[in-house]
Amino acid sequence: MTKPTPRSCLVTGPAGCGKTHNAPAIAKALGLRHILDDWKDGAPAPLLDTLVLTSADNPAWCFKGRVMTFDQAMQITRQQEVTA
């Protein structure tokens, strides 16, 4: 039996907060294999298996997937590191 492909997740935060630097760890913690950096509001975004990073103020209205702040993503990442 194969695992279902995870839905993409958008992580938002201000420029310079560490999204790009921490992207590999966040993607791993969320079970995602691909990273799309610097996504712009309204641009096409992959719906499966991708961590999407943006500095957009309110991207949830146009992104049809899981959306979280950088701080939320880092909290999940830290929890995964502790349990690993």
Image (cartoon, rainbow, N blue to C red):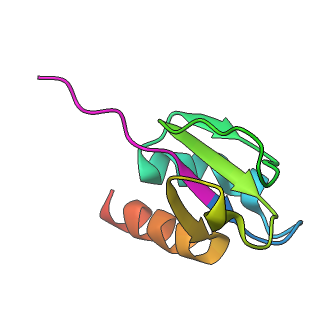
Q: x, y (%) of residue 49?
A: 48, 36
Judged left or right of residue 29, residue 22 is right
How many marks the image carries: the answer is 0
Q: x, y (%) of residue 78?
A: 48, 69
The part of the image, by quadrant, that contains residue 71 is bottom right
14 falls in the magenta region: no
Image quarter of the C terminus = bottom left
Q: x, y (%) of residue 60?
A: 62, 65
Q: x, y (%) of residue 14?
A: 83, 72
Q: Is residue 40 above or below residue 17?
A: above
Q: Residue at x 54, y 75 (%)?
A: 72
Q: Is residue 38 above or below residue 60?
A: above
Image: magenta residue range: 1-10
Which residue of the protein is positioned furthest toward the top in this rendering?
Answer: 1
Front residue of 42/78: it is 42
Q: Residue at x 56, y 39 (%)?
A: 50
Q: Residue at x 43, y 61 (%)?
A: 81
Q: Main secondary structure of the magenta part?
A: loop
- Decide if residue 21 is in sight here: no
Q: Is residue 28 above or below residue 61?
A: above
Image quarter of the N terminus = top left
Which residue of the protein is positioned furthest toward the left in this rendering?
Answer: 1
Q: Residue at x 53, y 52 (%)?
A: 64
Front residue of 78/59: it is 59
- Decide if residue 1 is in sight here: yes
Judged left or right of residue 30, residue 45 is right
